[in-house]
Image (spheres, grey):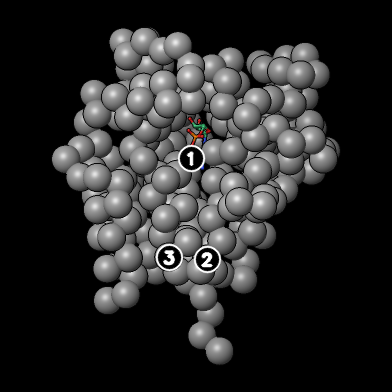
Amino acid sequence: MKKKPIICIDGPAGAGKSTIARMVARELGLVYVDSGALYRGLAWKALENHVNLHDAWALAEMAKNTKMNFKTMEGGGNHIFVDGTDVTSQIRSERVSFHTNEIAKVKGVRKVLNEMQKALGKKGGVVMEGRDIGTRIFPKAKYKFFLDASPLERARRRFLELKAKGRRVNLEKIAHALAQRDYKDKTRGISPLRQAPDAVVIDSTRLSLAQVAKRILKFVAA
Ligand code: C5P
């Protein structure tokens, strides 16, 4: 039997990766993996337990001793559990978003999460999104996409998404936070956000998310 594909989707914050990866996975009957949720899950745990975010050793030890898993809920939502606690909504707070960068640059943390991600894709059949999926986690994958959009469009999308959830938000603040997060992700010494040389680049500034998903599906079907 043919091994199911691994589809890697990387790109900066707010490029639409999650929605698109979910659409593609649903359409192809593959498992959707949000690798950012794993980084966020560890950041949440570190904040909850007052772990010093500048102590690389403590963060790596914490990562080694953390159990994380995804569960598809009734109705189709994808939830993340950290040591058995459902933290799906907590990991989206501004505080966790802000501190996830600190966690993500720690070598020992990335080592643990890299293994977790590789195990999730071991049998194929996954659409995984993040920052280093095509460059580091599955460098040999056949399908790699790098999604981008203008900073203003990415901020606008995030603004609308949060507003729809009933949050009081400010477009300028969101644009600033996204720019800061991208800068840190692109300039960190370990596994920075970078486009894999063999990735298909899609600029979604003037495309709807459904149009981007359609393009990806076309590539995979070809
Ligand atoms: O994808 P999301 O925006 O939820 O990711 C949150 C943060 O986790 C990113 O800004 C980045 O610092 C980190 N991350 C990473 N590598 C990944 C996925 C996420 O460093 N593969």
In terms of image quadrants, where is residue 92? top right
The answer to whether the residue bearing label 2 lies less than 8 angstroms from the nearest atom of ligand 1 is no
Q: Earlier in the sequence, mark 1 or mark 2?
A: 2
Q: Residues within 10 Å of mark 2 (few under 14, many from 20)?
A: many
Q: Residue at x 30, y 46 (%)?
A: 209
Which secondary structure, mark 3? helix
Mark 1 to mark 3 CA distance (whole Å) = 30 Å
The answer to whether the residue bearing label 1 lies less than 8 angstroms from the nearest atom of ligand 1 is yes
In terms of image quadrants, where is residue 104? top right
Mark 1 to mark 2 CA distance (whole Å) = 26 Å
Query: Which of the two residues, 101 or 89, is positioned nearer the viewer here?
Result: 89
In terms of image quadrants, where is residue 157? top left
Which secondary structure, mark 1? loop
Q: Residue at x 25, y 60 (%)?
A: 215
Q: Residue at x 28, y 40 (%)?
A: 148
Which secondary structure, mark 2? loop
Q: Viewed as shown, does residue 121 lie left or right of 196?
A: right
* Type of the residue with mark 2: Leu
Residue 78 in the image, given as x and y percentages of width and height? 61, 47
Disc nearest the viewer among 1 and 3 = 3
Residue 17 in the image, given as x and y percentages of width and height? 40, 44
Residue under pointer 3? 27
Residue under pointer 2? 30
Q: Residues within 10 Å of mark 1 (few under 14, many from 20)?
A: some
Are discs 1 and 3 less than 8 Å apart at CB?
A: no
Seen as rendered, the residue at the extreme bottom is: 1
Residue under pointer 1? 191
* Type of the residue with mark 1: Ser
